[in-house]
Structures are given as C-alpha cells and as structure tokens.
Image (cartoon, rainbow, N blue to C red):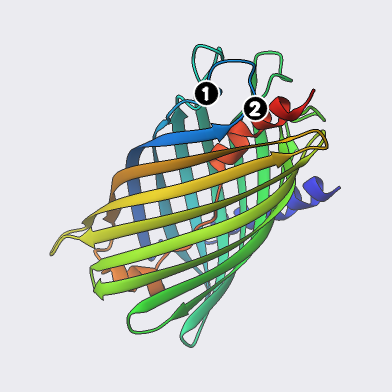
C-alpha cells in the first residue's frame, strides 16, 4: 500500500514539468562526472572478497520551468553507472546502472525556498535470491525540502520516504520502506567558487527480513571559469551501510573521489544558481541499494 501511494505521488509530481513546457525554462545545468573508490567490508562470504573497488561515471541535467508565479517547477534527469561493485571472481555480474527523474515544486520566500520533491528511478540490484544474480528494481521517493540563504551561505534541509514499487517480489536482498534525513551547507568564497558539504542518514527494511541503515557524507569544491558557462568540481564521499538480521550484522564502508564538469546554460554565477536556479536534488542511495542483498545474505545461516 505504501509503495503504491509513493508511486502515485511521484508520477503526479513528475507530470508537473509537462504543464510548464509552454514556457521556456528559465535556467539549466548539465553535468558529467567520473570517479573511483575504495571499499572496506565486514562480510562473511565463506572465502574471498564480496566487494571490489568501484569505478563510476554518470551525468545529470536540471532545469527550472515557470509555472504560476511565484511557484516554479524544477525537472531533473540523471544516470549513474557503477562498475566493479562486486568481486568478479565470485559474481557473474558486477556493474550496476541507475537512471531516473525527479520533479520539485518550489515556492520562493524571503531568504529561503520550500519545496516538495518526487522521484522515480531504476537500480540494478544484486542478490543471490535473483535467478541471474541481479535484477532491475524500480523505486519511488517523495520528500520535503527547504533552503535558507545568506550573503555567503546556502543551507539545505530535506527529509523523505522511499520504497521499491516493482522488481523485489518479496525476495531477500531488496531495500524497501525507508526514510532519510539530509542536511547540506554551501559556502561561497566568491560568486563563482564554493565549498559544499552534504550528509544524510537513512533507515529501511529488507523486503524479506532484517533492517538496513546507513550514512553518507560528501565534501565538494567547485569553480566556474570567468566569462564561461563551464565549471569544474572535485569531491570526496564516504558511505556506510549496515544490515542487521536476527542472526548477525554485516556492513561496508566506501570512500569515493570524483571529478566532473558542469555547464550552466544561461551563464549565471554559482551563487545565483544556488539561490535562484535549479540547484535542488534528491539522493538515490545507489551503492546502498545495489549491494544490500550481499550484506543481507551474508548474515543468514
């Protein structure tokens, strides 16, 4: 019932940008990125390593559409490819793809903005419960979000619910019925140079048995080139995920370093984009969702 409700809300929200297509988007951003990581795990696999050090690459685009002033709609499209998630000596398929879309309904206020976000995305999930070892699972996410602005800071608070809506079929190894809390802060060294921190915690269930929890933290530096639409950024991220069943616990820690470029279509400054443009986004929990099944199975007798 919860997953059906989330899917209905997400589909309705994703239809909002279609109503705004009559007006050209005000601002937009296109991003490409790539990175690599290191994994440390506490997993009982009966010999050998369960996880490998991942290599990832992806892209996203975010656009702002006028709706009915002062309300605006932000539409996002994103894709993320994560290779070598699992050790290829122990698993036939080791790569996971995530793709999806998000819509934000945003109401500007004095020195802040509030919004509602809804997202639908598909993730390649690994679990021995699947006949081929992996399966594409559809997820829905809905969230409330708030940004607060000062002359040098943009602050973010966000919280929401997520659940699988198709693909798990009551099999162990699928994360479902979760919620998360997220906070972020961006400090502007200048109008076109910033340092941003973002972190979240999440709690969820396994589709079959057990609880899942995790935390992420990310630090990023970005600089937009003078008289140009382009910026470059570098980031470092930390992710922790733990599965707890009645029998045992298992967890993994991942550190990722990534580099990328963004193109700001209307050449606005990073500061203006953060506070007036389509700067909101929602988490996807890609690695946590993809690898939760391996942690789950390793705890069962």
Identify the residue position indicated by label 2 in the image. 294
Residues at circles 2 and 1 in contact by the CB criterion of under 8 Å: yes
List x then y, in percent, for residue 149. Answer: 43, 81
Q: Is residue 79 above or below residue 106?
A: above
Q: Residue at x 67, y 60 (%)?
A: 160
Mark 1 crowd level (few <14, some 14–19, many ≥20, 10 Å Cα)? many
Identify the residue position indicated by label 1 in the image. 86
For this orientation, the residue located farthest to the left is 227
Q: Is residue 116 above or below residue 122?
A: below
Q: Quadrant of residue 41?
A: top right
Residue in front for this viewpoint, 25 or 292: 292
For this orientation, the residue located farthest to the right is 1
Q: Residue at x 55, y 12 (%)?
A: 92
Residue in front for this viewpoint, 20 or 46: 46
Q: Inspect this view and state whether residue 132 appears.
A: yes
Q: Earlier in the sequence, mark 2 or mark 1?
A: 1
Q: Is residue 47 left or right of residue 269?
A: right
Mark 2 crowd level (few <14, some 14–19, many ≥20, 10 Å Cα)? many
Per the image, label 2 sits on a secondary structure element best described as: helix
List x then y, in percent, for residue 187. Answer: 34, 72
Q: Is residue 93 above or below residue 168?
A: above
């Amino acid at each position: 019932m919860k997953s059906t409700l989330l899917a209905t809300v997400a589909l309705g929200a994703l239809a909002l940008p279609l109503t705004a297509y009559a007006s050209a988007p005000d601002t937009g951003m296109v991003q490409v990125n790539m990175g690599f990581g290191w994994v440390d795990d506490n997993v009982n696999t009966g010999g050998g390593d369960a996880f490998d050090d991942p290599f990832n690459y992806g892209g996203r685009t975010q656009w702002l559409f006028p709706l009915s002033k002062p309300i605006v709609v932000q539409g996002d499209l994103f894709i993320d490819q994560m290779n070598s998630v699992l050790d290829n000596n122990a698993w036939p398929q080791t790569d996971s793809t995530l793709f999806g879309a998000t819509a934000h309904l945003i109401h500007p206020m004095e020195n802040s903005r509030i919004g509602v976000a809804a997202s639908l995305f598909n993730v390649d999930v690994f679990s021995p419960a699947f006949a081929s070892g992996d399966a594409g699972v559809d997820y829905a996410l809905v969230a409330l979000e708030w940004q607060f602005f000062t002359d040098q800071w943009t602050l973010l608070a966000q919280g929401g619910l997520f659940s699988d809506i198709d693909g798990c079929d009551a099999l162990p190894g699928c994360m479902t019925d979760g919620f998360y809390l997220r906070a972020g802060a961006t400090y502007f060294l200048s109008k076109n140079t910033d340092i941003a921190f973002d972190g979240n915690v999440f709690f969820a269930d396994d589709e079959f048995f057990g609880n899942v929890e995790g935390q992420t933290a990310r630090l990023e530096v970005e600089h937009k080139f003078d008289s140009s639409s382009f910026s470059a950024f570098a980031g470092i991220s930390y992710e922790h995920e733990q599965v707890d069943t009645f029998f045992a616990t298992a967890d993994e820690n991942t550190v990722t370093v990534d580099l990328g470029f963004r193109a700001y279509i209307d050449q606005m400054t990073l500061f203006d984009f953060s506070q007036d443009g389509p700067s909101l986004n929602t988490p996807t929990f890609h690695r946590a969702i993809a690898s939760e099944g391996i942690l789950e199975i390793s705890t069962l007798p």
